Amino acid sequence: MTSRNNVKYGIVLVGALTLIVLGLAFSNSMQSSQENSKPSNNIDEPLSGSMSFLLEEYTLEDLSKNSDVIVMGTVKEILPSKWNSADGKRPDKVVEFGPYDLIYTDIIISVDKYVKNPLSSEEVIVRVEGGKVGNDTMAVEDEPSFKTGEKVLLYLTEDTSPGTKDTGPEHFKVTGYMQGKFTLTDDGRAIGWNQNISQEELLNTI
């Protein structure tokens, strides 16, 4: 009986040890799998992201009423994009875009005419969110796009965005995002994001 009991206890002990070893192996495997599935927080990796907004649709009268300044002019220069940091570079520890961590681009407009609230300056700076800095790219699909030499009529407002309002030189934002930009053509048309009207008709709404 004693011999049988010893064999019995030996089998139980071996079985228990086997279960412990298998349990540890499974635990290590799960831990390794979880570590591999964690999102990367490597600040050296390029950032790429896009944003869009639920826009309030403006009439032409709304654009005029909600704008601090309205200008007709020419796109003189599109400045290199920057991060909204003191040195214009990507801040340490930033691994994703957000309201306070973003890229912006300034556009210099040579003013031909102030249509509303004239200023003394012959140029104004218009700021849009988005751009490319090094390997980091941020796209904002609702912002207007610009080309050097383009003739434009712009509805402009003070920048109140928390991430850009206090960064860099004095500047404006386009009222209603892409709604507040019209390209002026040589044949007297004003082309907006969703309409094509005569420049005379557009000016009559201001």
Image (cartoon, grey):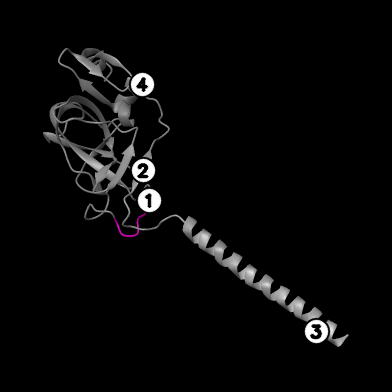
Sequence order check, earlier mark of 1 and 4? 4
Amino acid type shown at disc 1: Glu
Q: Residue 139 in the image: x percent, y percent?
A: 32, 39
As helix, strand or loop, the secondary structure at mark 4 comes to loop
Tag 2 near tag 4, CB within 8 Å: no
Tag 2 near tag 1, CB within 8 Å: yes
The CA span between labels 2 and 4 is: 30 Å
Amino acid type shown at disc 4: Thr
Q: Which residue is mark 2?
A: 49
As helix, strand or loop, the secondary structure at mark 3 comes to helix
* Residue 95 part of the magenta-drawn span: yes
Name the residue located 28 percent from the left edge and 54 percent from the top edge: 90
Which label was assigned to residue 96?
1
* Residue 89 part of the magenta-drawn span: no
Q: Which residues are magenta?
A: 91-96
Labels 2, 3: front one: 3
Q: Is residue 74 above or below residue 50?
A: above
Which label was assigned to residue 6?
3
The CA span between labels 1 and 3 is: 63 Å
Closer to us: 176 or 101: 101
Q: Is residue 44 above or below residue 67?
A: below
How many numbered tags mark residues here?
A: 4
Amino acid type shown at disc 3: Asn
Q: Quadrant of the C terminus?
A: top left
Labels 1, 3: front one: 3
Amino acid type shown at disc 2: Gly
